[in-house]
Image (spheres, rainbow, N blue to C red):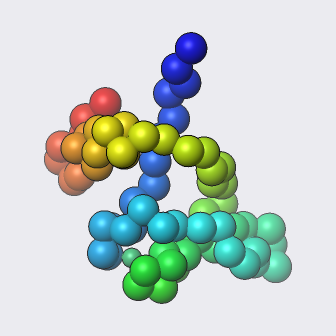
Amino acid sequence: MDNYVSVIFCRNCKSRFVDAGEWTQDGKVVVQCRSCNAKEVLSNFTLGRGRISNAELQNARDTAAKKDRYER
Ligand SMILES: [Zn+2]
């Protein structure tokens, strides 16, 4: 059985190497791009990790949400 997941990409450099890094004092996770070091604080979400095929990774890239154009 396949499982549906969402993939997070760096909007700055399009990298897939986005990790949960440090945590803020008030318990929010700081996600960081390992490619360009862009950082963002998330308060209601966190990241998981799994192995997906190159074809599925390309599907995720092809359906990445963009302003005024959300794909599912
Ligand atoms: Zn990046």
Residue 13 is situated, as x and y percent measured from the top left of the image, at 30, 75
Asked whether the viewer can see residue 61, the reply is: yes
Q: Quadrant of the C terminus?
A: top left
Residue ranking furthest to the top: 1
Residue 65 visible within the image: no
Ligand 1 rendered quadrant: bottom left
Give 53 or 60, whichever is nearer the viewer.
53
Q: How many marks?
A: 0
Q: On the rendered structure, is 63 left or right of 52?
A: left
At 56% from the left edge and 44% from the top edge, which residue is drawn?
51
In the image, 10 versus 34, the foreground residue is 34
Q: Is residue 21 left or right of residue 70?
A: right
Residue 50's place in the image compared with 16, above or below, is above
> Horizontal and vertical percent for residue 52?
48, 41
Nearer to us in this view, 9 or 53: 53
- The correct choice, above or below, for 70 with respect to 17 in the image is above
Identify the residue at image location x=72%, y=67%: 28
Residue furthest to the bottom: 37
Query: What is the x, y in percent for residue 20?
Result: 65, 67
State the quadrant of the N terminus: top right
Q: Residue furthest left?
A: 68
For the point 59% across and 67% down, the residue is 19
Quarter assignment of residue 53: top left
At x 25%, y 35%, the residue is 71
